[in-house]
Image (spheres, coloured by chain):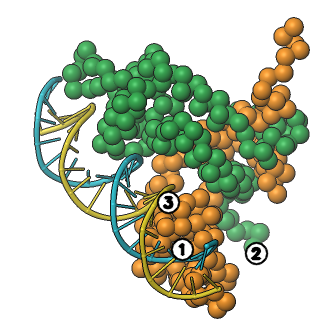
Chain colours: A orange, B green, C cyan, D yellow
Amino acid sequence: MSRMATRPTSPRSVPAAEAWGLMHELFVSQKGRFIAIAQEFDLTPMQMGAIRNLSPDRSVPMSELAGALHCDASNVTGIVDRLETHGLVERRGDDHDRRVKMLALTDEGLRVRAALAERMSQPPERLAALSAADQRALRDILRKALG
Amino acid sequence: MSRMATRPTSPRSVPAAEAWGLMHELFVSQKGRFIAIAQEFDLTPMQMGAIRNLSPDRSVPMSELAGALHCDASNVTGIVDRLETHGLVERRGDDHDRRVKMLALTDEGLRVRAALAERMSQPPERLAALSAADQRALRDILRKALG
DNA sequence: TATTGTTATACTCTATAACTATA
DNA sequence: TATAGTTATAGAGTATAACAATA
């Protein structure tokens, strides 16, 4: 009888669910390091997210950044205010629609973004301790999922 | 010449760094879902974290929860206040040291924790879409890293 | 009328510092 | 004196609502 029942959680995703849980655990354990990195750069987590999502070349409207950060547009005003005060981000007018303000990284902002990416890319010890083969296999599977 | 140079980033961790970056990307993409789940349960992210770290059986001091949540003890007061108001958490006195207050989930808190775990365990579509073999391989490698 | 970004408001998270009560 | 938890304070993130400028 019980073999006939189909659980709401599809069997096809059971190992993925455990993998997801383990990744979640790994992330939670790194929260302290994320905060420490943000403090190294004198940035809040949201300011870090904004810098990650901007570039000097392709400027984006405030609303697009709000979407990328998963927050309301009204928050972006304050976040960008502070980044602009620190000279990392610039507001530029848009030629076609004078309501929108385009955001772009300054040169200094670009330097900060690169340094930040370098620091963030360092994997947790428990990942770095995996064998080279396991690391490659992990990377390859994640590439398949995300690529 | 260049083959003699050793980069500051050890070659041993290069695939791990890319894997870590991909996991980070996956997490950022799920932020909206995390927030939605928290709202379903009428909890803030920190309240969710607190519930995840408590149980009815093993009560823990406020300070230990602060450590688990990577925040100052003064924050825990407010977080626990609100959870206690909603009947999910209980403060209990400690017999040996009357300064410390032990935290435990109520029965209702335990129910919420279980429902929350069920909802959070659902993996992102891109992981669930992996082949069964890839899912298992991913899970097994992460078990090695975290187990 | 509808939309973009800002401002105002209110609540939560956050750390620091001062405080209470214990130890 | 030192420690566990609270309270007070101030800065930041958060959404909602009201607003200005523009479309």
Q: Of helix, strand and loop, which one carries label 1?
A: helix
Q: How far separated are the C-alphas under marks 3 and 1?
A: 14 Å
Q: Nearer the viewer, mark 2 or mark 1?
A: 1
Residue A22, located in which quarter of the rendered image? top right
Residue A130, picture quadrant = top right
Q: Residues within 10 Å of mark 3 (few under 14, many from 20)?
A: few
Which residue is under mark 1? A112
- The residue mark sitting in front, 3 or 2, is 3
Real-space Cα separation, disc 3 to disc 2, in angstroms: 40 Å
Report crowding for label 2: few under 14, some 14 to 19, many 20 or more residues within 10 A (C-alpha). Answer: few
Residue A10 point in image, percent of width and height: 82, 30
Q: Identify the residue under disc 3.
A: A45
Name the residue rendered at 25%, 14% in the picture. B95
Q: Position of residue B130 (x, y in %)?
A: 85, 42
Q: Is residue B127 above or below residue A147?
A: above
The residue at the point 60 percent across, 41 percent down is B37
Answer left or right for B56 relative to A19.
left
User: Which residue: 54% across, 22% down?
Assistant: B111
Mark 1 neighbour density, 10 Å: few (under 14) some (14–19) many (20 or more): some
**In this image, A122 relative to B45: left or right?**
right
In three-dimensional space, the C-alpha distance between marks 2 and 1, rounded to whole angstroms, equals 30 Å
Location of the C terminus of chain B by quadrant is: top right
> Which residue is at the far top?
A1
Q: Is residue B73 among what the camera can see? A: no
Asked if residue A12 is positioned above or below residue A89 in the image, the reply reads above
Which amino acid is tagged 1?
Val
| Residue D8 in picture, x, y percent from top left | 18, 50
Mark 2 belongs to which amino acid? Met
The residue at which mark 2 appears reads as B1
Q: Is residue B53 toward the left or the right of residue A59 in the image? A: left
